Image (spheres, rainbow, N blue to C red):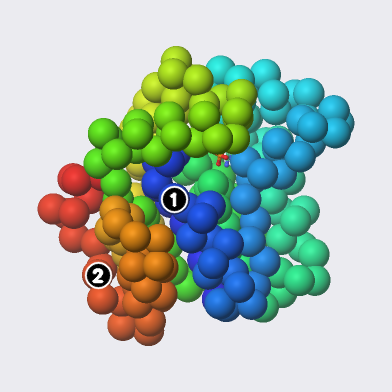
Amino acid sequence: MRIVLLGPPGAGKGTQAVRIAVQLDCPHIATGDIFRANVAEETALGLLAREYMDRGDLVPDDVVIAMVLERLAEPDCADGFILDGFPRTVGQAEALDQRLAAASTPLDAVLCFKVGEDELLRRLAARAAEQRRTDDDEATIRRRLEVFASTTRHLLDYYAHRGLLAMVDALGDIDVVTGRVLAALEPEPAAVADDDELALV
Ligand code: AMP
């Protein structure tokens, strides 16, 4: 299956993506992880990305798109993948669509993880203490949430109009959320997003 996971920072996309990737036996492509690995190795891509990441801003589309399209061209992605953290802009979504349409391999599902803002802030603060990510300080967290609300959120409408979007309640026990994610990936999604639900994200 070709799957995109959407949701604000702290919604648990990464945690769930790892689990679903094992379950579906397909690669998990997390753009944030790829950037962090490049930052750690001090590659040219990492040095460029770091400037944006440390501010909580998005890395420019051309850089991210080139990186993801290159990764998707690798043989392990031929039968499916889980994209976690990409796309984040309509430009990125369009580039992905074009690539997949050219190969006649469209997306199967886009899942959006729903979590209230108080819980997001609590989770991000806990992660900051545990993982010491340089972009988990308070000001950067606030900026990343703003970027989701002002930019990435438009993708919910983009994918809802294409009939691909399902909302997943991401509050609660990790196993329970995994069960909801897998249920949403069934051929008849249990919870197809309607306008009322979109307003809650
Ligand atoms: P994440 O781990 O997904 O929260 O990503 C961490 C940071 O990496 C983001 O705040 C952005 O600076 C950068 N990043 C990750 N994915 C993207 C993307 N698709 N577009 C632009 N920037 C990204």
Give the crowd class for mark 1: few <14, some 14-19, many >=20 residues within 10 Å: many
Q: Residues at badges 2 and 1 in contact (C-beta under 8 Å)?
A: no
Residue 186 x/y as whole percent:
38, 81
Queried on whether the Cβ of the residue with tag 1 lies below 8 angstroms from ligand 1, the answer reads: no
Q: Of marks 2 and 1, which one's residue comes earlier in the chain?
A: 1
Q: Quadrant of ligand 1?
A: top right
> What residue does disc 2 label?
191
Residue 97 visible = no
Q: Which amino acid does label 1 sit on?
A: Gly
Residue 70 visible = yes
Quadrant assignment for the N terminus: bottom right
Queried on whether the Cβ of the residue with tag 2 lies below 8 angstroms from ligand 1, the answer reads: no
Q: In front: 164, or 22?
A: 22
> What residue does disc 1 label?
12
Residue at screen point 77% across, 63% down: 73
Q: What residue type is labelled 2?
A: Ala
